[in-house]
Amino acid sequence: MADAKRARAAQEDEELLSALETCRALLSRRLAPAVASAFGPTPVPDEWAANLDRVLFASSTIQTRVAELGAQISRDLRAACAEFKPGQEVVVVGLLNGAVCFLNDVIRQLSVPYVVDFMQVSSYKGTTSKGSVELRKDMSISPEGKHILIVEDIIDTGTTLHWLRSYLKSKSCASVRVACLLDKKEGRQKQHSDVLVEYVGFTCPNEFVVGYGLDFNQSYRGLPFIAVLKEGAYKHS
């Protein structure tokens, strides 16, 4: 009798576990389309997803535009460097930390020889421009006589870019070009309204955006798309 009860209980446990697994699978299939439609197939931490208002530029849109920029940049640099000689190479300079994702994809699209270097400058404290630029890391390669391609994630006030152009000009570069993923023209300071940007991915609305290298307090950089951050996620932080 006892053995029969134990066997029946074990069978009931198996049936319950099977029913729970079926329920989990059904819920997963029902919820997946809603998540995918908002953020695509890439997993997004729940803590981040709750702070995202909407996707501004999808991953596929970004990659298409990056390919177009890479082709344009290659044509221009090929014309500028009819013959690549020692000391006349192209140096692609990524601005840390935000430009890493953009730079990584841009250089894959270049059809001219290049080397990669990095700089780190800061003109912001939190979400506010300080109005001055601090050089935290300079180039490791001498820019003298080189064709420089600055790769930046976003240009807002124009303060950093104005400073960079002046700084590199003083280093006797052969040329300086700028490629930025996002141009937030509404944020441009009046004195930098005419700052030159040769290659622009997208014009960005005057909203706080994250993803594809852009961050808030070092979070969200790894998202493959660019999204608008909810105001409540960064106000009073």
Image (tube, grey):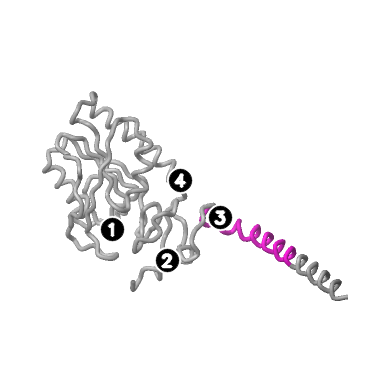
Q: Position of residue 231 (x, y in %)?
A: 39, 68
Quadrant in which the N terminus appears:
bottom right
Identify the residue shown where x is 56% and y is 58%: 35
- Residue with the mark numbered 2: 230
Viewport quadrant of the C terminus = bottom left
Amino acid tagged 4? Thr
Tag 2 and tag 4, C-beta contact below 8 Å: no
Q: Which residues are magenta?
A: 17-40
Taking the view exactly as shown, the residue that stands out farthest to the bottom is 2
Q: Which residue is mark 1?
A: 187
Q: How far across and how far down the image is residue 189, in percent? A: 22, 57
Determine crowd level at label 2: few under 14, some 14-19, many 20+ residues with C-alpha closer than 10 A: some
Locate residue 80 relative to residue 35 in the image: left or right: left
Q: Which mark is residue 37?
A: 3
Task: Give me the residue at 36% from left, 36% from top.
Answer: 70
Give the mark nearest the N terminus, 2 or 4: 4
What amino acid type should be assigned to the residue bearing mark 3? Ser
User: Along the polypeptide, which appears first: circle 2 or circle 1?
Assistant: 1
Instruction: Give the residue at x 46% y 56%.
Output: 55
Q: Could you tell which of marks 1 and 4 lies nearer the N-terminus? A: 4
Q: From the top left corner, tell me how far across and down residue 209 is, in percent.
A: 38, 58
Question: In 3D space, how far apart are the residues under numbered discs 3 and 4 (Cα atoms)?
Answer: 15 Å
Give me the C-alpha separation between circle 2 and circle 1. 18 Å
